Amino acid sequence: MEILKIMLVDDEERFLLTTKKLLSKKGYEVFTASSGAEALEKLKKQNIHVVILDVKMPEMDGMETLKKIKKHFPLVEVIMLTGHATVESAVDGLRSGAIDYLMKPADIKELIEKSEEAFEKRKRLEEKIRMAQAKRIMKSPRQIIKGL
């Protein structure tokens, strides 16, 4: 069974260290990035399933990072995380492709639950893609008979 790979993206070092330790103890493979740009670079090298992304970060904020993740890595599920949530930012995040939106400080159980849900969604999508590819490759009985 594949282990869920999570990337935490936040400019707060303490959050990254503490949350990584808690998630790692639960058996998840955890990566961290302290900026949107660093997250995008790591996504090029690692097959990450779920990104937990802070909204408020210097330079490239969470919304811009989310849009770039969804453009370049569409199968990566993103959970937005903020201490400054507004209804507008939550709606913008969900419209831009985030699967969920959580408030800081997020309960670790809720973070795990949402990450697991996101991972299951991704696995269902990957299975649909595999089925569509298999259908394209497989010939129908009519095509097989025509070829004889």
Image (cartoon, grey):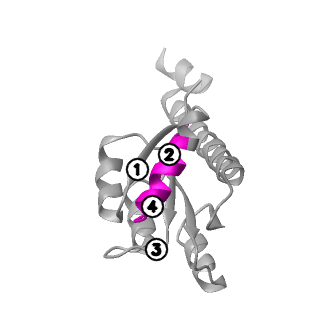
| Residue 5 in magenta stretch | yes
Identify the residue position indicated by label 3 in the image.
63
Boundaries of the magenta span: 4-21
| Residue 2 in magenta stretch | no
Q: Residues within 10 Å of mark 4 (few under 14, many from 20)?
A: some
Q: Residues within 10 Å of mark 2 (few under 14, many from 20)?
A: many
Identify the residue position indicated by label 1 in the image.
32
Residue placed most toward the observer, 82 or 127: 82
> Which type of secondary structure does the marked residue at label 2 adopt?
helix
Query: In the rendered structure, are the residues bearing label 1 and label 4 in contact, judged by CB atoms less than 8 Å apart?
Result: no
Identify the residue position indicated by label 2 in the image.
20
Residue 23, percent from left and from top: 57, 42
Identify the residue position indicated by label 4 in the image.
70
Mark 4 to mark 2: distance in Å? 23 Å
| Residue at left offset 36%, top offset 49% | 43
Q: Is residue 146 left or right of residue 32?
A: right
Q: Could you tell me the amino acid type at mark 4?
A: Lys
> Which type of secondary structure does the marked residue at label 1 adopt?
strand
